[in-house]
Amino acid sequence: MVTRWLGRCRACITTALISLSALGGTAHADVPIINPGAPGQPVRTLSAEEATQLAHTGYSRDDVRFIQDMIPHHGQALEMAALVADRTNRSELIDIAGRINSSQADEIEFMERWLDERAQPMHAHHGHTHMSHEMMGMATPEQMAELTALQGTDFDRLFLTLMIRHHEGAVDMVEELLDQPGSAYDPVLFEFTSDITNDQTAEIERMSTLLATLSSDPRVGLRAGFEDAEQAISNLQLIASLPKPVGFFDPQNPAGLPPEKPEEADSTAAAAADSTSADSTANKEEDDDRRSPLLSFSNTDMAFDGDVLAVGSYHGFNLYKLQKDGTPKHISSIVCPGGQGDVSIVGDLLLMSVEQTRGRVDCGLDGVGEDVSEERFRGLRIFDISNLKRPKQVGAVQTCRGSHTHSVVSGPGEEGKIIVYNSGTSSIRDEEELEGCIDGTPGDDRTALFRIDIIEIPVDDPSQARIIASPAVFADPETGSLAGLWRGGDHGDHTQSTRRTDQCHDITVFPKRQIAAGACSGNGILFDISDPLNPRRIDATVDAGFAYWHSATFNNDGTKVIFTDEWGGGSRPRCRAHDPLDWGADAIYDIVDDKLIFRSYFKMPAPQTEEENCVAHNGSIVPIPGRDVFVQSWYQGGLSMVDFTDSANPVEIGYFDRGPIDEETLVTGGFWSSYWYGGRIYATEIVRGLDILALAPSDHMSQAEIDAARLAEYDKGFNPQQQFPVTWPAEPAVAQAHVDQLTRSQMLDADTAAALTDALERADERLKKWRKRDEKLADELTSLGTALMDKGDLPQGQHLATLLGQIGARLR
């Protein structure tokens, strides 16, 4: 009876407690309430009111700090908006400033009232904020001063850049608050934080779109389309575009658009469904919204051998023969699903990486559904392609984490064996399915994490291919800890959250120098591979702006390396106008005394839309003598060509891009890989097919440099993640390329350049004739070379002089 009354009349609780006390209960006003304090501190006695204050759930200390920080944050937005009227006449910007003035002033009033009602101070201690201004996205005093001094388009550009970051800071602050236990319990405050996230996210998108329009780059604003997207090209020529072969796209949905959501059931059907079923369906739809489709038909990487081109796919691979003009002729399609489908060619063998759990040993199309199955294949497939029209699978090496990529390191040598480094990045298989696959249980050093696989393939019997070692290449050399490099997480305020280093995505080998560069999730690594079976880490680097170290490419002599950051995993828009230029970019390093020395970043500079996945991806060297030039894919950011001869100052010198695949929906597409081979650039388009491009003369590149690049001589074909230096013959075009470079950089005077060009043109004409001898011209070339040597510190002078002598020798 007492209990029932107390439940009905909370106002009578005190009276009830007194009554209980009188009856001999334990609640008594004389019983002390103690707060012990920290060790060594005096004990405090609390009143009942003070004790219950700790249990107050109306708001938390984090709520107060959030509001105290958000007030000056909004205040700076108002300061920036106040600058707009006198510095621009762009109507869209004036509208943005108007929305800021109306919304954020009202929100400041709300926040001040919220604090006042709770008797909380308006500002943090001594006027400082609890979070750093950088974390809050606020502009620095220097940036505010710069903004104040600008006018017109320059003001517009900086205002939008700063304000986008400012709004992102507000969203970050909300996320930080909601991560704290008990925060935003107050429904009014929670609604306020939701409004901030929704309003400012929408404003970010509007400002980003406007900021992109301020760029004069022709790649900005290209019309969308699957087959008819608008194109922009600079200093390149599009030679041919090949669609995907039949059987390698969905004929009902060739563009790979996501399926439309089914229409909601009508009210009658909804009323008939019971609540349990409705809840279940709602949860399923919510889960489906978060699921991504299998990239089952996506084109991936390429490999070349002689006149053979192999194009990998999540669905298998396609083989082509290269014609005299470099255009591929389709020979055969090999259906063997399983992703990722990266390929390499060694003689008559084609190697293909397979990582997805649906892959089958027999290349079947129906996948594998069981958790443990003998039919599942994840690892390295080996095909005999001696008959290009009927390749057959002749070997398969199962691995614990599958094969995301692989690197052909050496062979076949005298023993007839190929050595391959395998990089698995997926989940560890169940040991019941593959013995020896141990998960990441703490303290178990047998784990498949923190390792690469070394695979040996006997050419005479590929069926005997096997893993011969799985070295722990990331281990701490002093403690032996397998997790010896980056442990994951961010690097401090306003830095990337970087993946833990327990895998390598790509390992690019440079056999001539016996080194390899590993792009290993959380680190860039330099390896000594003088003993291919025992790769030794000689240096490692981290980068606060890198989210995921993805790929590595050396320059032609192996003295530099470009690492790429695949921020967003390749499926996110990461080249928007407000995205940082050092995130999702290239990092260029010199290799000095076996150490990686950072020099600069490069990122494709044209702002892309929210409907275009864009981030740094695969590329290769363009072999122009005397220069370091890199052609690279950026997914739907197109392909870009950059000169990094000066490691500290890379310069874009060419590009090709299309508009997004779809006007409204982000479809994962664009260029996966862009590689130079045999005088052409081949680029796999994930959804559309295969593009072939050629270099075009421009202010950045002369015809002689293009001709010299086409004369580059390869010892072998081209495999991703395996680099061999090219050489150039002693031809006049090669010498003229050096002359053009020295002239462009104003290192040669006009008279000397003219004399060299004239002599080389005559030498080229003579060498094309049946009777080549011309002693007088040979002497002239030798004399010109001697004059170059006399100039002393002339860059490339000695090399050019040597070339002139070699050409002269051919004329004698």
Image: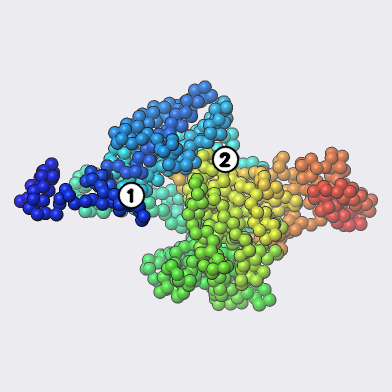
Q: Position of residue 124 (x, y in %)?
A: 40, 38
The image quadrant where one finds the C terminus is bottom right
In this rendering, the answer to whether 757 lies above or below 435 is above
SS at mark 1 in the image: loop
Residue at the spot 37% in from the left edge and 34% down from the top edge: 122
Residue depth check, mark 1 versus mark 2: number of the one nearer the observer = 1
State the mark number for residue 181. Answer: 1
765 or 235: nearer the viewer: 235
561 or 705: nearer the viewer: 561
Visible residue check, residue 157:
no
Q: Position of residue 238 (x, y in %)?
A: 63, 46
Residue at the spot 12% in from the left edge and 48% down from the top edge: 17
Residue type (three-letter) at the residue carrying disc 1: Pro
Residue 26 found in image quarter: bottom left
Q: Which residue is disc 2 drawn over?
A: 606
Q: Position of residue 369 (x, y in %)?
A: 37, 66
Q: Position of residue 223 (x, y in %)?
A: 51, 38
Residue at the spot 20% in from the left edge and 45% down from the top edge: 268
